[in-house]
Amino acid sequence: MNTIDLRSDTVTWPTEAMRHAMATAPVGDDVYGEDPTINRLEAMAAACFGKEAALFVTSGTMGNVTSILAHCGRGDEIIAGRSSHIFVNEAGNPATLGGVHTWPLAVQPDGTLALADIEDAIRPDDPHYPRTGLVCIENTHNGAGGQPLSVEYTDTVGELAHRYGLKFHIDGARIFNAAAALDVPVDRLTQAADSVTFCLSKGLCAPVGSVIVGSHEFIYRARRIRKALGGALRQAGILAAAGIVALEEMTERLREDHANARLLAEGLASIPAITLDASTIKTNIIYFELNDAAPISADDLGVALAAEGIVIGSAYGGQKLRFVTHYWIKTAHVEHVVQRIRELLA
Ligand code: TLP
């Protein structure tokens, strides 16, 4: 990359190995089920997550809404976090596309939904209410600073949802970051879930795409919904080829991004004008605030850094910023960024 771009791990460019795999991928028409590279990626994803089947989709957003619409119908309700991507950042798609209502719950600082809150939100069978159909959690939880949710917590939410006859979906856009941070296999981490969306195009560096995994029956319904949403692609093997490299080569190295995030957080936390507890950083996402000692605003800091090729985007309301580490952010970049911010905020 030609800039130091800390806005997100979505900004990652494909690796050389991905570009080569894309250029040489065997392809076919995926709507006929004939793209061998798509079929291979989907088989790999299902095996990796210990689920029966998988479906390639264009984005994490499409993975989540396709899953929600495969589980729920009009008049149903999902339970999701108040700061979850599903509730905040997906254009209200359960409602606009599916007539599905959302009950947003408070997200705890560790990224979880309190079990008592989930249980309280499950509706009794009463014609006044929507029908609760699905519980959604996000792992890692972006809005809580990339907090990874444990196996024990995930199992407990699954048990709770299933006890009430509900389905359980994980927005695992960054589930491989969670697995790396917790040092557990991704299939164990998602064992309790009926469906999982995971992204190839974030820390795993593929240029496009996400995958949803679940039972044969769930993926059968999801495939129809993907078609209805216009997301059934043709010779999409050129995209899946990068996804295969992502699964083969890019999951273990996420630990490097976490180490760089910790280093970055510790450096930022040592700057008096910044308020940040670096000990809370578990994966690749850092939120922090400029405090009263800062001589310039968060937006002005962004403008000053952009002039030097360091891209941090604009403030998340007030003086709050988010930095995300990824494959193209190396340790030397981290040291340089901390030094420049220290100088600009002196
Ligand atoms: N998140 C993006 C923005 O949309 C906020 C980012 O820069 O972090 N689930 C989670 C937890 C996500 O963080 C995102 C993207 C998605 C789903 C959606 O993925 P895409 O962008 O592929 O639709």
Image: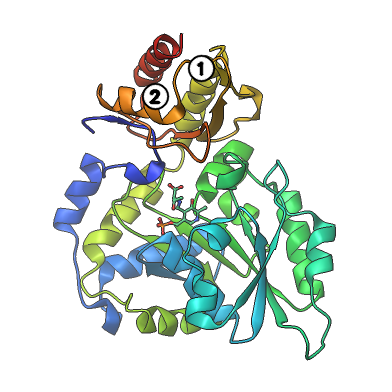
Check disc 2: other Cα within 10 Å, few if <14, some if 14-19, many if 20+.
many
Check disc 2 and give the amino acid type.
Leu
Residue 53, can we see it?
no
Q: Is residue 66 above or below residue 41?
A: below
Determine the residue located farthest toward the left in the rendered image. 23
Q: Residue at x 40, y 78 (%)?
A: 226
Q: In which quadrant is the N terminus drawn?
A: top left
Disc assigned to residue 294: 1
The relative height of residue 54 versus residue 225 in the rendered view (above or below) is above
Q: Which mark is residue 301?
A: 2
- Report the front residue among 345 and 219: 345
Check whether the beta carbons of the residues at disc 1 and disc 2 lie within 8 A of each other.
Answer: yes
Q: Position of residue 267 (x, y in %)?
A: 51, 15
Measuring from the top left, give residue 83's x and y in whole percent: 61, 53
Relative vertical location of residue 193 with respect to residue 130 in this rendering, above or below = above
Q: Nearer the viewer, residue 292 or 196?
A: 292
Q: Residue at x 51, y 17 (%)?
A: 294
* Left or right relative to 307: residue 57: right
Find residue 280 and report its image quarter.
Answer: top right
**Residue 103 numbered tag:** none
